Image: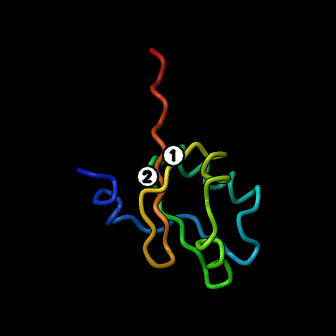
Amino acid sequence: MDLKAQAHHLKPIVMVGKNGMTESLIQEIDAALKAHELIKIKFQEAALEILEQDPTDWLTKLKAERVNTQGHVMTLFRKKPKKKA
């Protein structure tokens, strides 16, 4: 099953508001990725301009990949590191 299909039923767990992609928001997304691997983030009306910009900088910081963007919602994936035995 591909990641887009796996994410279909997920609800956004991080909201991006008028302050945009702040350092604290990046930390919040990082924590969500640590917990879930596959997440959706929703961009509110005041933050839609971020969707039109290149997300490479903050995706690189997060070591995450964009799976899909649909409407105001972006799906991100970052594989959890394997636990040491």
- The 10 Å Cα crowd at callout 2, few under 14, some 14 to 19, many 20 or more, is many
Whole-percent x and y of residue 47?
66, 77
Give x and y (percent) for residue 68: 42, 63
Q: Residue, x 75% and y 57% (percent of image)?
A: 24
- Give me the disc on residue 59: none
Dot 1 alpha-carbon crowd within 10 angstroms: few under 14, some 14 to 19, many 20 or more: few
Q: Residue 12, how many percent across, how many down?
A: 48, 68
User: Between marks 2 and 1, how big is the CA–CA gap?
Assistant: 9 Å
Q: Quadrant of residue 44?
A: bottom right
Q: Measuring from the top left, give residue 16's x and y in whole percent.
A: 64, 71
Judging from the image, what secondary structure is the residue with disc 1 in?
helix
The structure residue drawn at horizontal position 65% and vertical position 71%, both measured from the top left corner, is: 50
Amino acid at circle 2: Leu
Q: Which residue is mark 1?
A: 35
Q: Amino acid at mark 1?
A: Ala
The residue indicated by pointer 2 is 38
Residue at (33% x, 59% y) in the render:
4
